[in-house]
């Protein structure tokens, strides 16, 4: 029986009704993703894609995580939006309610699988890719079928070729973006074949040579909550790695009190240092993964903007970065990844944060999500008409194909 495997249990879990409030929440995540795509349309990745065939959805799958402003789930340590929305929009004949429901199921599958991975997995693998391919399959298959066996086979086929190695972050390259696009394409392909009757190994997660055995030491139990886990997903207000956000948030609090001066000490969790201890960034990508640069931006300029991670600003803030020292705090590490935290000390004052702006405990309001999207539209140099149309389509539109046409227009 399908429910005897983890993938089968997940497939059954995904087929619950999606209520109106959850679909409305999904619309905010859709708008957030559209902003991330539009903001990256002049990036080097976008230029490189100029000769690639496949249309706006292929391009948008590459662009959703370029600016490091894509939504994030803390415990799963992954970014659902860049994978889910190109997959959900891939069936433009679907109704808006069906598309939004499929996206919610995609978020659910991605978080459920990603949160079951352990620290060993995250040390080597890019969970947005490894869990994302399964989620894209779930999104596509559940949009086309209510048969749990078909959905389970789609996810099992996708999981059997799951991958995405973190070696990509050790040099300047675009593989991280390709990881997302490949997850979307491969997941949708797996769903298509499952719909045609091709079967997959339903014990692909827990089997003796399955995904857990290959990539984890101590996988966590898969959790099937009563609600929808899209409600656990955080919005990112600033264009830097999420691991830098707690330090940014704490530094902003000190700046508001007028005490962010002189040498600055940052204490945070170990993974934040693994990914973002970079005192001398030279490129925008490196700056986005630099705790020292992120805090220096706050000290010198205030609330970070995308311009603060561009080459001119990177060069200007060398002295300010030299004032920032970063250390691990064992207590903060112990709360991670359920909570991303940091303590910043400067000028005889300190600010300690357990959760950061955009987390469910400190949510970004609907107006905040809209303002962020509009700022990204402006960064991508959309016309006012294109920006207004994007907001309306995401929050009020009733035709998924109109969103695809909007993407075609801006890309």
Image (cartoon, rainbow, N blue to C red):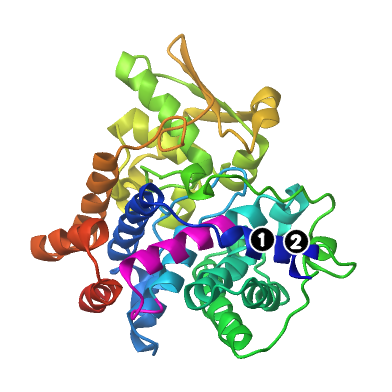
Q: Image check: 52 left or right of 126?
A: left
Judge the density around disc 2: few (<14), some (14-19), many (≥20) Cα neighbours within 10 Å. many
Q: Is 174 or 155 nearer to us in this picture? A: 155
Residue 238 in view (yes/no): yes
Marks 2 and 1 in Cβ contact (< 8 Å): yes
Name the side, left or right, on which 178 lies relative to 238. Answer: right
Q: Which residue is the extreme one toward the top?
A: 348
Residue 66 rendering spot, x and y as whole percentages: 42, 62
Residue on which the image places disc 1: 10
In the displayed structure image, the side of residue 226 where residue 153 appears, left or right: right
Residue matched to label 2: 6
Q: Report the Cα–Cα distance between label 2 and label 1.
A: 6 Å
Decide which of 44, 316 is in the foreground and name it: 44
Q: Which residues are magenta?
A: 90-109
Q: Is residue 133 above or below residue 408?
A: above
Number of numbered markers: 2
Which quarter of the rendered picture does the N terminus lie within? bottom right
């Amino acid at each position: 029986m399908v429910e005897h495997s983890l993938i089968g249990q997940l497939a059954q879990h995904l087929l619950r009704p999606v209520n109106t409030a959850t679909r409305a929440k999904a619309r905010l995540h859709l708008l957030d993703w559209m902003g991330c795509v539009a903001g990256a349309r002049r990036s080097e990745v976008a230029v490189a894609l100029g000769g690639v065939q496949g249309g706006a959805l292929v391009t948008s799958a590459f662009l959703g995580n370029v600016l490091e402003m894509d939504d994030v789930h803390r415990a799963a340590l992954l970014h659902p939006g860049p994978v889910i929305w190109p997959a959900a929009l891939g069936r433009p004949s679907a109704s808006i309610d069906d598309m939004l429901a499929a996206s919610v199921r995609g978020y659910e599958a991605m978080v459920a699988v990603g949160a079951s991975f352990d620290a060993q997995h995250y040390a080597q693998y890019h969970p947005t890719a490894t869990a994302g391919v399964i989620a894209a399959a779930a999104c596509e298959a559940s949009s086309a079928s209510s048969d749990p066996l078909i959905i389970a086979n789609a996810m099992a086929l996708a999981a059997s070729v799951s991958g995405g190695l973190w070696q990509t972050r050790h040099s300047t390259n675009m593989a991280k973006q390709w990881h997302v696009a490949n997850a979307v394409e491969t997941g949708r392909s797996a769903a298509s074949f499952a719909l045609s009757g091709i079967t997959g190994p339903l014990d692909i997660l827990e089997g003796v040579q399955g995904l857990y055995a290959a990539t984890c030491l101590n996988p966590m139990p898969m959790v099937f909550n009563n609600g929808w886990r899209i409600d656990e997903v955080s919005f990112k207000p600033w264009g830097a790695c999420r691991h830098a956000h707690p330090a940014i948030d704490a530094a902003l609090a000190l700046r508001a009190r007028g005490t962010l001066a002189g040498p600055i000490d940052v204490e945070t969790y170990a993974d934040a240092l693994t990914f973002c201890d970079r005192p001398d960034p030279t490129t925008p990508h490196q700056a986005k993964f630099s705790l020292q640069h992120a805090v220096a931006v706050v000290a010198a300029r205030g609330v970070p903007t995308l311009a603060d991670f561009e080459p001119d600003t990177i060069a200007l803030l060398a002295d300010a970065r030299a004032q920032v020292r970063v250390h691990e705090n064992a207590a903060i590490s112990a709360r991670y990844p359920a909570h991303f935290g940091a303590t910043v000390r400067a000028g005889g004052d300190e600010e300690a944060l357990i959760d950061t702006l955009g987390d469910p405990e400190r949510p970004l309001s609907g107006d905040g999500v809209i303002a962020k999207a509009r700022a990204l539209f402006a960064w991508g140099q959309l016309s006012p008409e294109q920006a207004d149309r994007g907001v309306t389509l995401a929050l009020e539109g009733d035709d998924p194909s109109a969103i695809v046409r909007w993407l075609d227009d801006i890309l």
